[in-house]
Amino acid sequence: MTKKLINGVMTKKLTVNVDERGRLMEILRNDDENFECFGQVYMTTAYPGVTKAWHYHKLQTDNFVCVRGMMKVVLYDARPDSSTKGEINEFFIGEHNPMLVVIPAGVYHGFKCVSEYEAIVINTPTNTYNRTTPDEYRLAPHDGSIPYDWNRKDG
């Protein structure tokens, strides 16, 4: 479904190095082209079929990678002055497609677990979460505010 990347969105194909001891996968380095700054690192999960959407941040960039299972990550550009306003990007990331997705401030995003078991996302946002005044602005996932259908597309 991805036509062109939303302005400011970047992806990085991740490499998994394997030997007899196990696996190693670098996710984000401070010398990467897409590295802005460090705020914190956290883990979030979704159970099979669960959608967590929509929200955006005014201040922070998110750096998503799915390290277990598979997630469908969807972005929507609602920024009024963006040349990609109205564009939707869809990424399938996780065990079968290791990828970092960089989500700039102002871009709505959400994800749905598309694996048969709980999927785990690691996020390294550029800002620390402010519990008193969170930088999160939300819409319901299925109310039609964003022109995207979270249902599986068979065919």
Image (cartoon, rainbow, N blue to C red):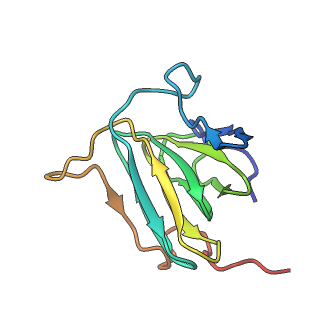
Task: Pick out the residue farthest to the right.
Answer: 155
Which of 78/68 is in front? 68
What residue is shown at x 38% (from left), y 43% (from top)?
A: 41
Residue in the foreground of this view, choosing between 62 and 120 = 120
Image quadrant where residue 72 sits: bottom right
Q: Position of residue 80 (x, y in %)?
A: 47, 46
Furthest residue to the left? Answer: 132
Q: Residue at x 49, y 22 (%)?
A: 30
Give the percent coordinates (x, y) of residue 43: 41, 54
Q: Residue at x 47, y 50 (%)?
A: 122
Residue 59 position, x and y percent, is 33, 39
Image quadrant where one finds the C terminus: bottom right
Location of residue 43 with respect to 83 vertically, above or below: below
Of all residues, the one furthest to the front in this rendering is 20
Disc tally is 0
Quarter of the figure with the N terminus: bottom right
Q: Residue furthest top?
A: 31
Instruction: Give the camera-side residue of 98 and 79.
Output: 98
Is residue 89 positioned above or below 99 on the image?
Answer: below
Q: Is residue 37 left or right of residue 9?
A: left
Name the residue located 13 percent from the left edge and 52 percent from the top edge: 132
The x and y percentages for residue 7 are 59, 38
Foreground: 42 or 52?
Answer: 42
35 relative to 96, above or below: above
